[in-house]
């Protein structure tokens, strides 16, 4: 999505790019190999579409650029992989944005509820437009190159207590990732938020340490949270997004046309990624629906009410944490709405 040379992402004409492709193999005999680590399994959307990107890049560079994909934390947890990309011991990682807030506070803008448009085309336009470029640019000062930004699902609420309307959230306890933005999101609903490790969530729901949680439907199904929860509201209030990070030394060693090919490949597979994710979510919902959990779909009006209740408090917490860089990013977001 983002290159580090001044001509930008979309200024190469198709004719010029074709000419570059014809000469690339001869001009650049050197091979470039990048190991790309991530956390999901080989059966999940992220890995499947990384393999698609790898195939496109290999084909379009005449085999000069090879991506080796390592799923399921084979190269370490996300912090280890992110630091590896920064230090140059790993060429690239695809990281959940929610796991990068401690590394780059600006990216926590994606924790703000209902920041992303509900329409998939509008959401992708935001990722590929000025806001997406500005977000990826914030990684430069952290010693990595933000190359692309992928969707990876939407969060929904579950609880052991009724969630009939917004008022029902009052006094309930919800597990969140360690994020002031998410804590303020629940505070704004009159609920309390408790930061707990993901590995402890199932037991915490089962024993009543917390009443509820928020996650995408496929996560709720895969981790069997629906087995220890009585109520599910499909609210799609929070975006789960992936950021593609490359080591700057490796990235800058590439010929400019190879950078363009890689950027374009990451963008090109997004429609297939969205379709695959949607099928995974539907399959998860089918499984969840066979259980005894009460499922309710929040109406557009209710989602608007959720946004009105949560957005400003979460935004204030984000600006307080991210400072001037966060405000600059919000300014770009607002200008492109």
Image (cartoon, helix red, strand yellow):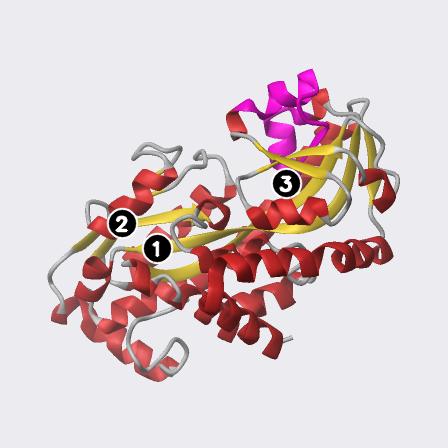
Q: Give the structural element (helix, strand or loop) at label 1.
A: strand
Q: Residue 211 is drawn in which quadrant? A: top right
- Alpha carbon distance from label 2 to label 1: 7 Å
Q: Which residue is mark 2?
A: 85
Mark 3 in CB contact with mark 2 (< 8 angstroms): no
Q: Which residue is mark 1?
A: 245
Specify whether residue 311 is in view: yes
Report the residue at 35% width, 81% height from top: 12
How many residues crowd mark 1 within 10 Å: few (<14), some (14–19), many (20+)? Answer: many
Report the residue at 45% width, 68% height from top: 325
How many residues crowd mark 3 within 10 Å: few (<14), some (14–19), many (20+)? Answer: many
- Alpha carbon distance from label 1 to label 3: 23 Å
Q: Which residue is mark 3?
A: 216
Dot label at residue 138: none
- Which residue is at the front of the view, 89 or 278? 89
Mark 2 in CB contact with mark 1 (< 8 angstroms): yes
Asked if residue 247 is positioned above or below residue 194 in the image, the reply reads below
Q: Which region of the structure is painted magenta?
A: 200-225
Q: Give the structural element (helix, strand or loop) at label 3.
A: loop
Q: Position of residue 94 (x, y in %)?
A: 39, 48
Whether residue 189 sits left or right of residue 12 in the image: it is: right
Report the residue at 30% width, 72% height from top: 4
Residue 205 part of the magenta-drawn span: yes
Quadrant of image for the C terminus: bottom right
- Tally of marks: 3
Q: Position of residue 27 (x, y in %)?
A: 13, 71
Report the residue at 49% width, 73% height from top: 328
Residue 80 part of the magenta-drawn span: no
């Amino acid at each position: 999505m983002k290159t580090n040379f001044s001509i930008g992402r979309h200024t190469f004409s198709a004719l010029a790019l074709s000419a570059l492709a014809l000469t690339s193999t001869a001009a650049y005999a050197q091979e470039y190999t990048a190991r790309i680590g991530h956390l999901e399994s080989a059966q999940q959307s992220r890995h499947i579409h990384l393999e698609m990107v790898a195939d496109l890049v290999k084909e379009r560079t005449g085999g000069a650029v090879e991506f080796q994909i390592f799923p399921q934390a084979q190269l370490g947890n996300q912090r280890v992989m992110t630091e590896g990309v920064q230090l140059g011991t790993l060429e690239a990682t695809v990281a959940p944005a929610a796991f990068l807030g401690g590394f780059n506070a600006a990216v926590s803008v994606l924790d703000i509820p209902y920041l992303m448009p509900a329409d998939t085309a509008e959401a992708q336009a935001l990722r590929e437009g000025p806001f997406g470029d500005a977000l990826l640019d914030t990684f430069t000062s952290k010693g990595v190159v933000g190359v692309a930004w992928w969707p990876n699902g939407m969060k929904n609420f579950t609880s052991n207590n009724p969630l009939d309307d917004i008022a029902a959230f009052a006094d309930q306890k919800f597990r969140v990732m360690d994020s002031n933005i998410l804590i303020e999101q629940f505070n704004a609903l009159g609920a309390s938020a408790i930061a707990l490790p993901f590995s402890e969530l199932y037991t915490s729901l089962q024993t009543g340490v917390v009443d509820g949680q928020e996650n995408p439907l496929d996560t709720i199904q895969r981790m069997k949270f629906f087995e220890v929860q009585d109520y599910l509201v499909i609210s799609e209030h929070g975006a789960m997004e992936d950021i593609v990070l490359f080591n700057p030394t490796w990235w800058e060693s590439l010929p400019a046309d190879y950078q363009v090919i890689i950027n374009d490949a990451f963008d090109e597979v997004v429609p297939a990624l969205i379709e695959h994710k949607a099928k995974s979510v539907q399959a998860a919902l089918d499984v969840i629906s066979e259980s005894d959990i009460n499922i309710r779909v929040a109406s557009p009006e209710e989602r608007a009410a959720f946004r009105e209740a949560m957005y400003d408090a979460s935004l204030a917490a984000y600006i307080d944490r991210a400072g001037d860089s966060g405000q600059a990013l919000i300014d770009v977001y607002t200008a492109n709405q």
